Image (cartoon, rainbow, N blue to C red):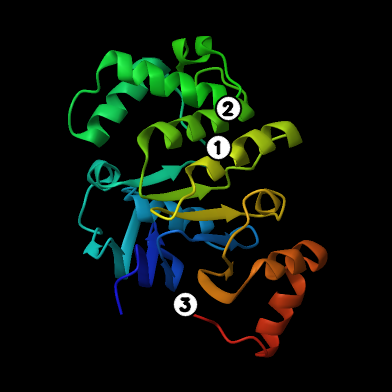
Amino acid sequence: MSASLFEIDELKVQVGGKPIVKGLSLRVDAGEVHAIMGPNGSGKSTLANALMGHPRYTVGGGAVRFQGESILDLSPDERARKGLFLAFQYPTDVPGVSMINFLRRAVSARRGDEIPVREFRRQLRAELDGLQMDESFVRRYVNDGFSGGEKKRAEILQLGLLHPTMAIMDETDSGLDIDALRVVAEGINRFRSEANGILLITHYQRLLNYVRPDVVHVLVDGRIVKSGDFSLAEQLEAEGYDPILQEIGNGAVPVLSA
């Protein structure tokens, strides 16, 4: 059997010596969208940051392979250059660095050579139009003074320009009103293709109504406890997490590692 685009095998992650992710496994094939849902404190953002190589998160075991290659020994920028992308739940402000300079440098780094100005501007204009954003937006400093919705649109702008092979979206829907949510979801769907994969991390079904996942996973206490199709997200929206938590407590739901 050929390797999946993105593979996580029995991953364990600690923060400050405390185990948070406790042996998590999943596979994302090219063309697939997987959603991870779970209550607060279940380890969703820890997983996202560890996959991107954030130094605060210590991997204590397991493996992560991207296009068949182990990436745990790679730095965050090396992972990004290979085509791994993380949209942050709380994007960082970078005063003094304009969006347009940041984006052009990021695109050039991803390409491995300097992107010509004319080509960059053409791509930038197309992405801005798709996100219903004016070009004055990219003259501002990165996330500095941005609203929550603007920060999330800036993340999707990066997604569209960088053309990663595997995108991890950490609660991209948080803080968005319905109009901004629709625009962001359209950006994700424009990126979606048979050549790439997406891992959507979210609390709620509302983003998944626009970006329909192939597989939904439920993460509880650092482990995937249940996986299914979109109907699982609908069940969680209708019933909440309590029934699954009760089933786990009663031993009725086996803790799944994949």
Type of amino acid at the residue the image marks with label 2: Leu
Residue located at (52% from left, 48% from top):
170
Type of amino acid at the residue the image marks with label 3: Ala
Mark with earlier residue (1, 3): 1
Farthest bottom residue in view: 251
Snapshot quadrant of residue 17 = bottom left
Where does the image place residue 20, in percent across and percent down from the top left?
Answer: 46, 64
Q: Which mark is residue 131?
A: 2
> Closer to us: mark 2 or mark 3?
2
The residue that disc 3 covers is 258
Residue located at (39% from left, 62% from top):
14
Q: CA distance from mark 2 to mark 3?
A: 35 Å
User: Is residue 113 visible in this depiction of the protein?
Assistant: yes
The residue that disc 1 covers is 187
Q: Nearer the viewer, residue 239 or 67?
A: 67
User: Is residue 98 visible in this depiction of the protein?
Assistant: no
Farthest left residue in view: 113
